[in-house]
Amino acid sequence: MADFKEPRRMIRAFDAFPKVPPSQQVHSVRGGYTSLMMYLFMIFLIWIEIGGYIDGEIHKLFTVDDVIRHDLRINVDLIVAMPCNFLNTNVRDATDDRFLASELLNFQGTTAYIPTWFFESKKKVVTPEMESVLRNSMNAEFQTQGTRDNEELPACHIYGYIPVNRVKGDFHITAKGYGYRDRSFVPMEQLNFTHYINEFSFGDFYPYMDNQLDMTYKITDESHHSFHYHMTVVPTTYKKLGVEIDTNQYSLTNFETGGKYIPGIFFRYDFDPIKMIIEENRIPFWQFVIRLVTIIGGLVVIAKWTFKGFEKLIYISFGKEFARRGDEKKEGGLLDRHEEEFETI
């Protein structure tokens, strides 16, 4: 029997988790406060980890666009403060192709009245968040194409889409007789290119997504006045849980001038060879469990050593008697084992 106990005694010497008999355990008020704070902080960290696991992490990646794209659409919805029968709309690109956008867009005469909330809205230029894109990614189509109604009214509502080559180009709105030969000519004093843009986007038409020029306007009192917008289009792909949405963002610079250029509204665009990928990823469940265990274990160890250091500091500064105030030593009961009994297990 003694020979059997000897190997067990040797193995017990490597025990990294020594046991303390209940009769030797001491409970203190300071220890109680430390434990409560540790538990609360532990719950807080676990809550953050669970939220991070559920929500995932957003990764943004810039890469060379490896998709060969030949064409795309320009989606337009704006109001110009001139009658429709005064206006021409055209597209010209780097290949010298010219699209008669007037044959594709819809021209609807309207009054110059614009709702007051249009002017009160404060435009913020931001990259759309993942949830916003998924929530607003309802594809739509314009129901009509090439229609003209009430062209004699004082303002013109131009809307629809134009298929263009995916090369550098410009879409412009000018008055008849300016920039292109036309059988009619609009007198200079009747020109007014004040305009209000409801939608200006590239690619598939998502009416609920916000773009740089959406809900913007420019006002002028001059007849010989031109507005110039320069845009660089960046293909942007959003990925989440197997759902993939292709959109096109664009950066924007603009200026306006009077008397120097042909009066009108000019949208010049170019395409960036870089593609932006915004993807939501989640760590595997087993990594999530390991992180939780690491947080709990690390927090317990840190709290233990912090409490011991604080107790040592009190002992050195105020003495043994002060350090033991509020301590309560647990008395051993009938079921408690004494220290020497641990040696005989």
Image (spheres, grey):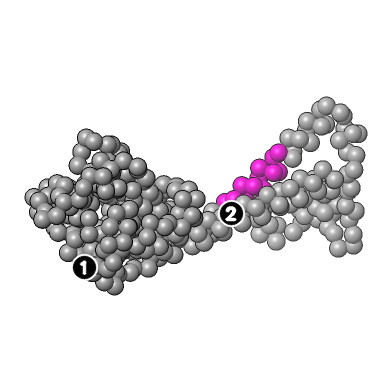
Is residue 345 left or right of 120 when viewed as pictured? right
Across and down, in percent, residue 18 comes to: 70, 49
- The residue sitting at 76% across, 50% down in the picture is 36
Residue closest to the far top: 317
Other-residue count near label 2 (Cα within 10 Å), few / some / many at <14 / 14–19 / ≥20: few
Q: Which residue is drawn at 22% across and 55% down?
A: 87
Marker disc for residue 146:
1
| Front one among 149 and 245 | 149
Q: Which amino acid does label 2 sit on?
A: Ile
Q: Name the residue under label 2.
A: 48
Q: What residue type is labelled 1?
A: Gly
Image location (x, y in percent) of residue 157: 31, 61
Q: In which quarter of the image is the C terminus?
A: bottom right
- 292 on left or right of 272: right
Residue 52 disc label: none
Asked if residue 189 lies left or right of residue 210, the reply is left
Magenta span dominant secondary structure: helix
Element at badge 2?
helix
In the rendered image, is residue 18 in sight?
Answer: no
Label 1: few (<14), some (14–19) or many (≥20) C-alpha neighbours in 10 Å: some
Q: Earlier in the sequence, mark 1 or mark 2?
A: 2
* Quadrant containing the N terminus in the rendered view: bottom right
CA–CA distance between discs 1 and 2?
55 Å
Q: Give the range drawn in magenta.
A: 292-306
**Depth check, front residue: 169 or 176:** 176
